[in-house]
Image: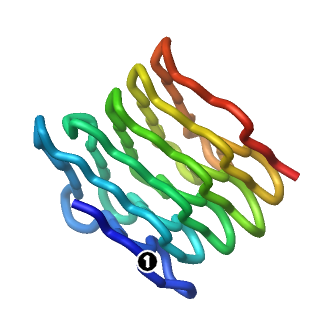
């Protein structure tokens, strides 16, 4: 599946927006031979995907796809490819072994590929499998590849990246 040229310039999540409501919110994709490509997305936060836990815990699990690629997505603020904000509840993001984040950009702030913000007392968790590739992502402020911040409260953010990940030529200006 390829999602191409999705423009949501004033909103969040160029292709996919997830907001936790009710008891829990979950997005998962599972296909052992499945490929997901999101490219040329545009949004204020999360050029391809934006997630916030809102009123409940949220989980994004894309770890079972054969490959997952995010190319040339742009956020006019933060999270060139993916933006995750935990708010007051836990947020979990799992990307599998064959993920590629390349040439994504955050033009005004942080996280050329991924920006994760924790503004509450729960935990943000980001897991990226072996073989991940993050190349030539750019952020105007901080975190050319990944930016993680706890803005207030007592929450924490945990980022785990597999042993054979390749992070090259990512920049913040």
Q: Residue at left 45%, top 53%?
A: 70
Q: Can the viewer see residue 102?
A: yes
- Residue 101 lies left or right of residue 57; in this view the side is right
Q: Is 117 above or below relative to 21?
A: above
Q: Residue at left 27%, top 53%?
A: 36
Q: Quadrant of residue 130?
A: top left
Q: Quadrant of residue 107?
A: bottom right
- Determine the residue located farthest toward the right in the rendered image: 173
- How many marks overall? 1
Tell me where residue 44 appears, x and y as whole percent.
Answer: 59, 76
Q: Is 47 above or below relative to 35?
A: below
- Determine the residue located farthest toward the top in the rendered image: 163
Tell me where residue 48 appears, x and y as whole percent.
Answer: 45, 64
Tell me where residue 76 appears, x and y as whole percent.
Answer: 67, 74
In front: 106, or 23? Answer: 106
Q: Residue at left 11%, top 35%?
A: 32
Tell me where residue 158 appears, x and y as whole percent.
Answer: 52, 29
- Mark 1 crowd level (few <14, some 14–19, many ≥20, 10 Å Cα): some
In front: 86, or 132? Answer: 132
Q: Is 14 above or below relative to 158?
A: below
Q: Can the viewer see residue 115?
A: no
Residue at the disc numbered 1: 5
- Residue 156 lies left or right of residue 128; in this view the side is right
In front: 13, or 170? Answer: 170
- Determine the residue located farthest toward the bottom in the rendered image: 10
| Coloring scheme used | rainbow
Q: Residue at left 47%, top 83%?
A: 7
Disc 1 element = loop
- Residue 88 lies left or right of residue 112; in this view the side is left
Q: Where's the N terminus, which quadrant?
A: bottom left
């Amino acid at each position: 599946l390829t999602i191409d040229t999705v423009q949501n310039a004033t909103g969040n999540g160029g292709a996919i927006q997830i907001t936790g409501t009710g008891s829990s919110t979950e997005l998962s994709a599972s296909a052992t031979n499945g490929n997901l490509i999101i490219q040329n997305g545009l949004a204020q936060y999360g050029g391809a995907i934006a997630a916030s836990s809102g009123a409940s815990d949220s989980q994004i699990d894309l770890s079972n796809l054969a490959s997952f690629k995010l190319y040339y997505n742009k956020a006019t603020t933060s999270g060139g490819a993916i933006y995750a904000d935990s708010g007051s509840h836990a947020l979990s993001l799992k990307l599998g072994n064959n993920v590629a984040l390349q040439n994504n950009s955050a033009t005004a702030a942080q996280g050329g590929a991924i920006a994760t913000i924790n503004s509450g007392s729960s935990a943000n968790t980001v897991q990226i499998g072996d073989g991940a590739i993050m190349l030539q992502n750019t952020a105007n402020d901080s975190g050319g590849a990944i930016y993680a911040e706890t803005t207030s409260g007592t929450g924490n953010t945990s980022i785990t990246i597999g042993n054979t990940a390749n992070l090259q030529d990512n920049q913040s200006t």
